[in-house]
């Protein structure tokens, strides 16, 4: 697969800035910014809005996300956050006394708190899986999924270390024991190949402001066909059958539109944000998920080798997501390390005692050099 050349010109990133922190938040491209401005202008003149304006852009976003993850657009709901999607899933997965909810240690809180609450409400038990340090998490997760498991609630890539889970293998194990699979793919969708035909999640939530390159407060929830008659968090008007007839909205109905639209957030049309989300998805689809994954893997592989040569303990390539690189901080590392790096124009994160380095296509060789030189000087 071809390596995508640096896309820096599509972003407003000064030359003196090395931004290696996509797992925190992606910058917005010039195309996305222009689309956001066009969307905001629509709301500035509400007399020009038409009924299709409430439907066309959300449906365009659904269709593009479905292409990205190899799913059907009818199964895609629009949500403002991963937590909204996970909460929807948690309310629609049957639980009870003696049943287990399998989580990964240190996974993002939004994918933990709803399950802890549901366990208290139903008498279910939360089981937290801790893989060996520095290793992929698949085997430890598979070992925890048995006949008592009602749901495996997992990421594809752990947000702190990048530890990888083979979700297709987890799906097969869930099928063997009759468990549901609920995913938060915020730290993977868009950056690596994500195939819902192979993974077959019951629910999969994605916040779009990281690897999906979209605006904040946008995201998606995929819902499997057998779960689409579930209970939404909101009872909005636009997901009901016949909602396009604005004059007839008080002819109340208990029928929903088909598919996952019943799970949509309120005010899903969001004229200011939806055009930017569609523009971001067009950019991702133009690059191609496989080529993005290979390009990011090439960069993290090269950076990992350089950090290893500096004596840092770097997570093995096979154990992590291809777009994530983590290196343990050595003893005596300065407490203000991130501030020192930022002073040199280098921006990344520390999570769990490790550097978390997450570049994207805007990065180039000059960014790598700036980062490595600044790190050497700081350590």
Image (spheres, rainbow, N blue to C red):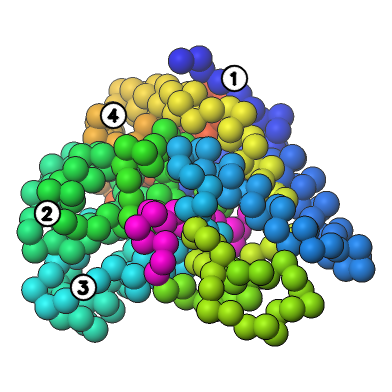
SS under mark 2: helix
Crowd band around label 4 with a 10 angstrom C-alpha radius: few (<14), some (14–19), many (20+): many
Please identify the quadrant where the C terminus is shown. top left
Label 2 sits on residue? 177
Q: Position of residue 121 (x, y in %)?
A: 24, 84
Question: Image quadrant of residue 100?
Answer: bottom left
Q: Is residue 245 left or right of residue 299?
A: right
Mark 4 vs mark 3, foreground winner is: 3
Mark 3 lies on residue:
95
- Mark 2 near mark 3, Cβ–Cβ under 8 Å? no
- Per the model, the C-alpha gap separating discs 4 and 2 is 31 Å
Estimate the x, y position of residue 127 in percent, counting from the top left.
14, 64
Q: Residues within 10 Å of mark 1 (few under 14, many from 20)?
A: few
The residue that mark 1 highlights is 5
Distance of mark 1 from mark 2, alpha carbons? Answer: 45 Å
Image height check: is 291 above or below 152?
A: above
Residue on which the image places disc 4 = 317
**How far separated are the C-alphas under marks 2 and 3?**
14 Å
Q: CA distance from mark 4 to mark 3?
A: 37 Å
Q: Dot 3 lies on which element?
A: loop
């Amino acid at each position: 697969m071809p390596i995508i050349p640096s896309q820096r010109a599509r972003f407003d990133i000064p030359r003196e800035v090395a931004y290696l922190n996509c797992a925190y938040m992606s910058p917005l491209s010039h195309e996305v910014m222009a689309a956001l401005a066009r969307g905001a202008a629509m709301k500035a003149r509400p007399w020009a809005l038409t009924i299709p304006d409430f439907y066309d852009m959300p449906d365009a976003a659904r269709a593009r996300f479905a292409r990205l993850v190899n799913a059907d657009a009818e199964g895609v709901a629009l949500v403002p956050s991963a937590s909204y999607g996970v909460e929807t899933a948690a309310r629609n997965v049957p639980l009870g006394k003696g049943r287990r909810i399998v989580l990964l240690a240190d996974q993002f809180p939004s994918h933990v708190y709803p399950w802890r609450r549901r366990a208290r409400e139903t008498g279910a038990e939360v089981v937290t899986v801790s893989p060996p340090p520095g290793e992929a998490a698949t085997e430890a997760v598979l070992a925890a999924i048995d006949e008592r498991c009602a749901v495996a609630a997992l990421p594809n890539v752990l947000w702190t270390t990048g530890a990888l889970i083979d979700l297709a293998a987890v799906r097969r194990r869930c099928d063997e024991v009759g468990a549901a699979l609920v995913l938060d793919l915020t730290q993977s969708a868009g950056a690596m190949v994500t195939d819902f035909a192979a993974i077959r999640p019951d629910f999969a939530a994605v916040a779009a402001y990281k690897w999906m390159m979209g605006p904040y407060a946008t995201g998606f929830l995929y819902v499997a066909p057998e779960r689409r008659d579930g209970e939404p968090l909101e009872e909005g008007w636009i997901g009901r059958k016949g909602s396009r007839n604005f004059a007839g909205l008080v002819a109340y109905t208990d029928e929903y539109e088909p598919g996952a639209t019943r799970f949509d957030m309120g005010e899903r049309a969001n004229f200011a944000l939806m055009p930017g989300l569609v523009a971001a998805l067009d950019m991702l689809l133009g690059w191609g998920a496989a080529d993005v994954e290979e390009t990011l893997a090439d960069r993290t592989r090269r950076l990992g080798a350089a950090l290893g040569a500096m004596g840092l303990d770097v997570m093995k390539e096979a154990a992590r997501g291809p777009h994530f690189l983590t290196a343990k901080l050595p003893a005596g590392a300065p407490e203000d390390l991130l501030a020192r790096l930022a002073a040199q124009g280098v921006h990344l994160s520390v999570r769990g005692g490790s550097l978390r380095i997450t570049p994207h296509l805007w990065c180039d060789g000059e960014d790598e050099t700036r980062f490595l030189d600044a790190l050497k000087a700081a350590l």
